[in-house]
Amino acid sequence: MASPFEYAPAPESRAIVDIAPAYGLFIDGEFTEAAGGKVFKTVSPATEEVLSEVAHGSAEDIDRAVGAARKAFEKWSALPGAERAKYLFRIARIIQERSRELAVLETLDNGKPIRETRDTDLPLVAAHFFYYAGWADKLGHAGFGTAEGQSGAVPRPLGVAGQVIPWNFPLLMLAWKIAPALATGNTVVLKPAETTPLSALFFADICRQAGLPRGVVNIVTGDGSTGAALVSHPGIDKVAFTGSTAVGKAIARQIAGTDKRVTLELGGKGANIVFDDAPVDQAVEGIVTGIFFNQGQVCCAGSRLLVQESVHDEVLDSLKRRLSTLRVGDPLDKNTDLGAINSAEQLARITALAETGEAEGAERWSPECELPSSGYWFAPTLFTNVSQAHTIARDEIFGPVLSVLTFRTPEEAVAKANNTQYGLSAGIWTEKGSRILAVASRLRAGVVWANTFNKFDPTSPFGGYKESGYGREGGRHGLEAYLDV
Ligand code: NAD
């Protein structure tokens, strides 16, 4: 079931990407139908238009894919790091060349604004491949053993990695998983999320374009049952999962007692802390980026605003004025700030949690904005008068909904920020460098941004405390997750 994949420079429009009516699974370098021929549809969340029909992988397909990855592992892991690096550099360059096409594709399948896929996601995807390509021949210098050709223990790859990713950054999560796995000499079977399978299938084509040996990367599309079959397959040596805390816990239970390695990147409820000395305009931009980037469907979103009581009114007035300027609508329009919610299920979840916020007594506010009549949409929303006991202050909403709380002292800010089951991210807004250091060192969050938010870099490790998961992806630390050290 091959499909036309051609790069054609054109304006940022639907026409730039050629989506085939049907896609197969990518196993052992070929697109193939699922055993049993089962398929599912993927739709554009902005219009509900069916984009394509995609093969639904079963346990049998997973078994084939793991077999292909196992076979490929022997040769791939034996290649000198410098040779593996060449493939990764090639993949990175093809991603750059095809980035406009991929950005439009991702925007169509996910619903996020083209400005984000074009200016944030795709450059980061390429950057991850470039970054880990650079490590492939330097693993012995990464602090995990000795270098190739020297005596001593050279760090070894784990084997076949089973990787399961969510829908919020489909191609970026793929890059976070595949780039370090390949650089360290592992082979992979990756399962994309059921609502955003297309960019992973285009990536499969990029692997072919780059001449990557068969079986090194396998993509099996499907739903949670496909993911569960992958995670529980005895031929998998390492599980890398990004998704909800509930599924992460189920996976941890499933693989307990096996010798599989695991990294879990799960949910979050990040605190964005604004002190009274922070420049209000900059802080407001950071609050907006923190919670409305990608419609708030970001694990490390700053979904709890903690604002110092003395500047609460000033910050809220300014924030409301700024929110009134946000443009919600067609994700393919380069002026759009907020696109569509990824699925009807996610929209229902956001709607229900926002209703709970009102029912529990918080005050709801949204700017006036007209939402398109078809597709899945949710207006940017603020809740004030929120207490720590409120559901909207505790549960991950994963949507464009901000819960505003206040504090008086830095101690209270730290206590409130840490009062969560999660520990993925936090932000601090203040002019005082000493306060940044003092507060950051007491926050139980994997990443703490100072006077910025939602900034990502492949050199920097990412991961959580508590129910946000364990293990780190990105940077030098990200290599360790794929090495026997
Ligand atoms: P999800 O857990 O429902 O699904 C994630 C993936 O797991 C999908 O591919 C799904 O098909 C698969 N899956 C479902 N059940 C499975 C099972 N039993 N075994 C194996 N795989 C299974 O999450 P989602 O709704 O797609 O994504 C949103 C969640 O992901 C949010 O909670 C968000 O915070 C989290 N997330 C975390 C990070 C991070 O780096 N920490 C990044 C992005 C998203």
Image (tube, rainbow, N blue to C red):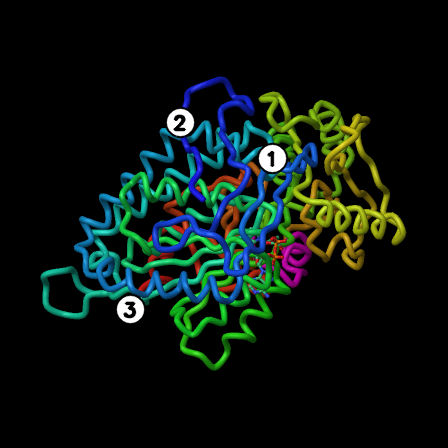
> Mark 3: which amino acid?
Val
User: For numbered disc 3, what is the local secondary structure?
Assistant: loop
Q: Quadrant of residue 342?
A: top right
Camera-side residue of 223 and 383: 223
Q: Measure the C-alpha gap from mark 3 to mark 1.
A: 39 Å
Outermost residue to the bottom: 257
Residue 401 location, quadrant? top right
State yes or no: residue 374 in magenta: no
Pointer 1: residues within 10 angstroms few (<14), some, or many (20+)? many
**Residue 361 visible in rendering:** yes
* Nearer-the-camera pick, 398 or 181: 181
Q: Is residue 255 above or below residue 225?
A: below
The quadrant of the rendering that contains the N terminus is top left
The residue segment tinted magenta is 411-426
| Residue at disc 2, secondary structure | loop
Amino acid bearing label 2 = Tyr
Q: CA distance from mark 2 to mark 3?
A: 41 Å
Q: Position of residue 294 (x, y in %)?
A: 61, 38
In which quarter of the view is residue 380 placed?
A: top right
Quick one: which residue is furthest to the front in this view?
A: 36
Q: Taking the image as four quarters, which one is ligand 1 found in?
A: bottom right
Name of the residue lying farthest toward the top:
11
Q: Which mark is residue 7?
A: 2
Q: Where residue 385 sits in the image (x, y, percent)?
A: 83, 46
Position above or below: 142 against 331: below
Q: Which residue is mark 1?
A: 112
Q: Mark 3 sits on what residue?
A: 485
Three-letter code for the amino acid on which mark 1 is drawn: Lys
Closer to the observer: label 2 or label 3? 2
Q: Alpha-carbon distance for marks 2 and 1?
A: 22 Å
